Image: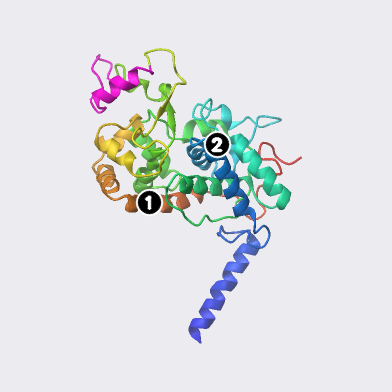
Amino acid sequence: MARTLITMLMVLISILALANGSDLCPQFYDHSCPQAKDIIQSAVAKAVAKEARMAASLLRLHFHDCFVKGCDASILLDSGGSIISEKGSVPNSNSARGFEVIDEIKAAVEKACPKTVSCADIMALAARDSTVLAGGPSWEVPLGRRDSLGASLSGSNQNIPAPNNTFQTILTKFKLKGLDIVDFVSLSGCHTIGNARCTSFRQRLYNKTGNGQPDFSLDQSYATKLRQNCPRSGGDQNLFFLDPVSPTKFDNSYYKNLIAKRGLLSSDEILFTQNQQTMEFVKKYAENQELFFQQFAKSMIKMGNITPLTGKSGQIRKICRKVNS
């Protein structure tokens, strides 16, 4: 009897939380838009089938959004009126992509359920679906986020970890968002898919130390190969696989690459060379893909919970690129 009462109480609390919009929960749209998840999954599958790289792009959009003002779809806003878009920031300019895919998904969801599903939730689901389509883990995405009424160009420039940041700088940026050193290592594993531009790692190929010495944290045969399409000057936008072993498959090759000195970005390499704790995690994930998958899913849920707008805060944008008039 007591157990039944406790169960009923828990259900009641969940219903009240859902009604008040105060908490995120996977069942948020089960009654208001039950087809939303299927619509989003289908659209993501279509986009990834057309271009495998899109899986990494959609995953990255969610990451870059959550690190600025929380997971509120501020990264999707175009400039206009008092809004200066985050798309022009250093981490996003000529780099962040997938906006058209989000537009298509939003239009389809609006047709089915007008003014119901937020752009922020669409991004969170698209990130999960992209991971699964690439062969990675799945997880229940807590839902109920609302969309911001503004953007933060300065926040985008300052808060998103950069390829050339020091270990401590990146860790601090994670901690400021409520993420820890385990999240740092596991979320970096998303670099098992996707691409990076020459400009993001050129300093590792040419005189990184300032004394003409090569970067010995990078395998020299790999470095020689990279130099072929990443010259000292020019070619800034030339693309390279973050994981040359299995570039479109979400697996643990990223960690194996780090151990073999074939991590492309400095922000990757430092996980194995500058901290004993992160080095041990790299070794564990390189040996045990399932362990990596389990932690990645946990860390993605945790990242998706960074200061979301809920309840009556923000709005449900009709078009993700602009606030409702």
| Residue at the extreme front | 49
Which label sits on residue 50? 2
What's the magenta region? 209-230
| Residue at the extreme bottom | 1
Quarter of the figure with residue 5:
bottom right
On screen, residue 184 above or below 229? below
| Residue at the extreme top | 233
Q: CA distance from mark 2 to mark 1?
A: 25 Å
Residue at x-position 58% and y-position 36%? 75
Left or right of residue 285, residue 54 in this image? right
Q: Percent x, y for residue 50?
A: 55, 36
How many discs mark residues in the rendered view? 2
Residue holding disc 1: 293
Q: Is residue 298 visible?
A: yes
On screen, residue 246 above or below 19? above
> Is 301 contained in the magenta span?
no
> Is 211 contained in the magenta span?
yes
Way the structure is coloured: rainbow
What element does badge 2 sit on? helix
What element does badge 1 sit on? helix
